[in-house]
Amino acid sequence: MDTDRENLTHHISKSFNRELEDLRNRVLRMGGVVESQLTDSLNAVANANEELAHSVIEHDYQLNEMEVEIDEECVLILARRQPAASDLRLVFAMMKTITDLERVGDEAKKIAKLALKLAESKLADQRYNEIATLGWYASDMLHQVLDALARLDPELALEICKKEQVVDREYKAIMRQIITYMMEDPRTISRSLEAAWAARALERIGDHARNIAENVIYLVKGKDIRHTDMEKVQDSIHRPK
């Protein structure tokens, strides 16, 4: 384990150390629930599975509750411990991360609602196959960023930041195709708009995954790399604090 990670996982106060570790574990558990929700929503779209879609929608409240509970724990740690340096970064990074995770859950819920419409229409559509591909890519980004958070791995987090650009390109390609469908056959406008909303939800999930990756880099390296060119970020990751 390098010095940065050691500073994040060792404290003079054992009880404080347990509190911070518990905080990170709770965020990771929330991440696991979000990942499961996203996977279920994508499977619901791929298979027009109405039951699975309903399950995603009905369990969204759990993520809202987890966000509130973890946020309250962060406030208590700030008030009781008055953390500084890397400990303070950890609390702030977790607060920002749960916001992004909750929003990924919201996007998964939107995708599940699309799955319900597909189940009702009982119609297959090539557009949704393309969206499914984008969906699994966004899902893989989420899985990897949670792994980066669990291992406090800024190098993996950096790779996720780069992958978000691929999601953006795929999203733009799908949108161009959807616009072409609508221009060629106005009767497809309604279904094309549904496909566009699903693609937009997945593009937003890629954005949230990148946000979490940036939080990991900030947490471990103490560097805010938002709105920074990727080459400069690469240098920042490998430069000592």
Image: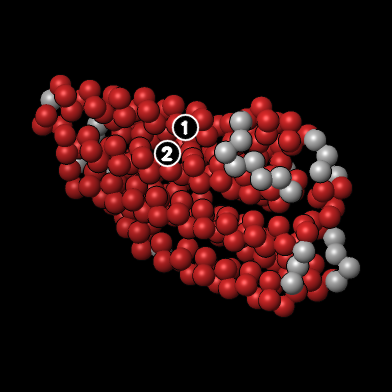
Question: Which mark, residue 241?
Answer: none
Asked whether 56 or 66 is in front, the reply is 66
Is residue 197 found left or right of 215 in the rendered image?
Answer: left
Task: Label 2, secondary structure: give it.
Answer: helix
Asked whether 181 or 127 is in front, the reply is 181
Residue at 69% across / 72% down in the picture? 77
Choose top left, top right, bottom left or bottom right for residue 27.
Answer: bottom right
Mark 1 or 2 closer to N-term? 1
Mark 1 surroundings within 10 Å by alpha-carbon count, few (fewer than 14), some (14 through 19), many (20 or more): many
Question: Which mark, residue 167?
Answer: 1
Residue at 42% across / 27% down in the picture? 170
Q: Find residue 83 and report its horizontal and vertical position in percent.
A: 75, 67
Q: Find residue 140 and report its horizontal and vertical position in percent.
A: 54, 38
Determine contact: label 1, label 2, CB under 8 Å.
Answer: yes
Q: In this orientation, does residue 107 appear?
A: yes
Q: CA distance from mark 1 to mark 2?
A: 6 Å
Single out the residue that lies furthest toward the bottom: 80
Single out the residue that lies furthest toward the left: 187
Q: Find residue 239 and report its horizontal and vertical position in percent.
A: 80, 35
* Residue type, mark 1 in image: Val
To which residue does mark 2 refer? Answer: 203
